Image (cartoon, rainbow, N blue to C red):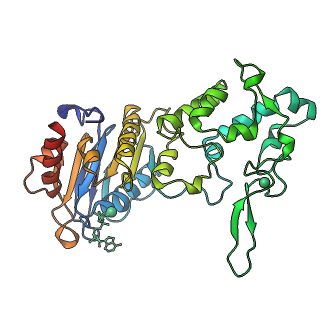
Amino acid sequence: MIRERAAPDQVFALGTVRLSTDPLHTVHALDLELPAGRLTAVTGVPGSGKTTLVLDSLVPALVAHTTGSALPSHVHAVDAARITRVNVVDATPIGVNVRSTVATYSGVLDDLRRAYAQTPEARELGLSAGDFSYNTGSLKCPRCEGTGQVSLDVQFLPDIDIVCPECDGSRYSPEADPIRRTPSHGDTDDALTLPEVLALTVAQAMDRIGDIRRIHTRLQALIDLGLGYLTLDEATPALSGGEAQRLKLASELHRNQSDALFIFDEPSVGLHPLDVRTLLEVLGRLTGNGATVVVIEHDLDMIANADHVIDLGPGGGELGGDIVATGTPDEIADTAVSTTGRYLRAHLTRAAR
Ligand SMILES: Nc1ncnc2c1ncn2[C@@H]1O[C@H](COP(=O)(O)OP(=O)(O)OP(=O)(O)O)[C@@H](O)[C@H]1O
Ligand SMILES: [Mg+2]
Ligand SMILES: [Zn+2]
């Protein structure tokens, strides 16, 4: 097991989220119970109704509950006393253009701009934090306007984006180069320019700029998410789905989550087994901070590590739409009518050997 599951008799000890629905699409009228503060996997063969139940019924019902608006017409009751925030975390790209980077999205660049504005060189030149923005500041590369790329007009072909030859992709003009910041516990040999810092990975940056308390916290969150290998200037739209999904949690790891419910639709799709392990650790951090987490999952490792499983089926389409089994992964594995249970039994047996 990768994470420590709740003891079987403690799964519902922190409270229960209840949902009661009329039929929708192929999903029958259901009464659903989720343990608060735990990791629940919603499972079932393709077409069994997982997405319908979670994204078309549970999420709109909870959103209505938290905003005080009317419930969806097919939902007749929802009881989620302590939940005031619903967060659907999907794997869609972050940002639409190359101006969104790991540094901007995580908030690290805001803190860095302030730190660079306080260096003696910047004060002497009368530069403020705003000047250090590669989007709107005076130090941005004039050729690429701070995108780090320029469009190459090739005859008969669509434009090709290449690394800006002027700034070498650093996004800054040479005027940023004399402005160096020395870490509070370093000497001038450790001084770096802002473009040099942005070229570092998150893990490297921890050594070089981690002396700034707010930045330390932000970088630590990225490292905890298994993203320490990303460079700060990496454009977020180019991240993989799994990376984007985890990055979206960067501001969520270090706060109390007992009023929050997180939903993930197949978060493990396309992930390497090592990434599945990281994802489980991240989900464990969320529940550790009190969050109620629901994942729609096919991955047996993910399912085996959940505190509670709700298995839909028995088949897909018209043959599905019912709750076949609920309980701990071991209880599901012992349920003969559950297809998921059969696979889970084999998986748990293999894992135990
Ligand atoms: N908007 C809709 N209108 C009518 N039927 C729908 C609609 N959305 C889904 N269905 C049907 O409801 C059934 C359940 O679909 P759903 O997407 O909930 O399954 P799922 O368990 O999430 O499957 P998968 O594992 O493939 O994602 C399917 O037979 C599907 O065709
Ligand atoms: Mg689905
Ligand atoms: Zn440039």
The x, y position of residue 288, in whole percent, is 38, 32
Ligand 2 position by quadrant: bottom left
In the displayed image of the protein, which residue is found farthest to the left? 336
Instruction: Decide if residue 142 is on the left or right side of residue 135.
Output: right
Instruction: Decide if residue 219 is on the left or right side of residue 79.
Output: right
**Is any atom of residue 80 visible in this view?**
no
Judge by depth and name the residue closer to the eye, 28 or 162.
Answer: 162
- Asked where in the image residue 9 lies, by quadrant, the reply is top left
- Looking at the image, is 267 positioned above or below residue 109? below
Judge by depth and name the residue closer to the eye, 320 or 260.
Answer: 320
Judge by depth and name the residue closer to the eye, 50 or 167.
Answer: 167
The x, y position of residue 278, in whole percent, is 39, 40
Q: Residue at x 71, y 19 (%)?
A: 186
Judge by depth and name the residue closer to the eye, 339 or 314.
Answer: 339
State the quadrant of the C terminus.
top left
State the quadrant of the N terminus.
top left
The x, y position of residue 80, in whole percent, is 35, 45
The x, y position of residue 43, in whole percent, is 25, 55
Q: Residue at x 24, y 49 (%)?
A: 300
**Is any atom of residue 166 visible in this view?**
yes
Total labels: the figure holds 0
Q: Residue at x 85, y 55 (%)?
A: 142
Instruction: Decide if residue 186 is on the left or right side of residue 138.
Output: left
